[in-house]
Amino acid sequence: MLPADDYASLVPNPPTRFGLTELRDAYIDAVADEQIQRPMAAERRAYFAGLCGLFELDLPTSRKALGRSRARYVHGLVLNAAKSLLRTRSPWDGYLEAGALLGALDDLGIGEAHRSMAVELRTTVDASRSQHRALLDLLLTALLGEHAQVVFTLADLEAAGIERAVPIRYLPD
């Protein structure tokens, strides 16, 4: 349970420095928006395209955009990794309030066993998501080459006319 005044841990401040991590996260959001249109998809797409421009990277977000270049094989793997990450879920994803469900499971006599399994599965899902992000970081680092260590500031984004967009993880399911 969070203390009543601990809102910062729920929605952290947006970044003020933009490097590989922010590019990766913007890419994941763009791929997700290709699959399911959500509010502010155009803004997230523009943000992702702007970051790609700063990093001098053309990164397709759909199969039809892979093209015929030699990089299409690696681009395809990057796309597959992002889609796999987006599919990595648990049965409890999407529940905002599960009190009634937990009560029903307790009434069935499986509440404690369920909680134990939920913790184990959540740990596994979190580890898988972390590994997916690490794979994307590895692939993007290789594709970016010497640009992989570049970090842009908020002033750099503003100078390029790039507006930060609300990441999908902050939108309700």
Image (tube, helix red, strand yellow):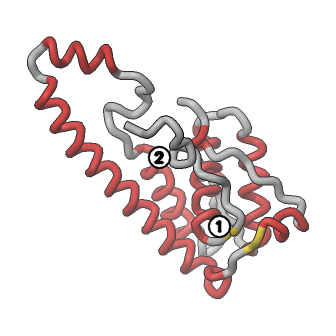
Q: Could you tell me which secondary element the residue under label 1 belongs to?
A: loop
Q: Position of residue 81 (x, y in %)?
A: 46, 58
Residue appearing at x 83%, y 70% in the figure: 156
- Residue at the far bottom in the pictured view: 146
Mark 1: amino acid:
Arg
Residue appearing at x 11%, y 23% in the figure: 110
Q: Is residue 146 left or right of residue 138?
A: right
Could you say which disc has been placed on residue 68 in the image? 1
- Residue at the far left in the pictured view: 109
Q: Quadrant of residue 54?
A: bottom right
Label 2 Cα neighbours within 10 Å, binned few <14 / some 14-19 / many ≥20: some
State which quarter of the image contains the N terminus. Answer: top left
Q: Quadrant of residue 55?
A: bottom right
Q: Nearer the viewer, residue 87 or 157?
A: 157
Residue appearing at x 59%, y 51% in the figure: 12
Could you say which disc has been placed on residue 86 in the image? 2
Count every numbered label the image shows and give the total: 2
Could you say which disc has been placed on residue 153 in the image? none
Q: Position of residue 126 (x, y in %)?
A: 35, 52
Residue appearing at x 64%, y 56% in the figure: 26
Q: Position of residue 107 (x, y in %)?
A: 15, 12
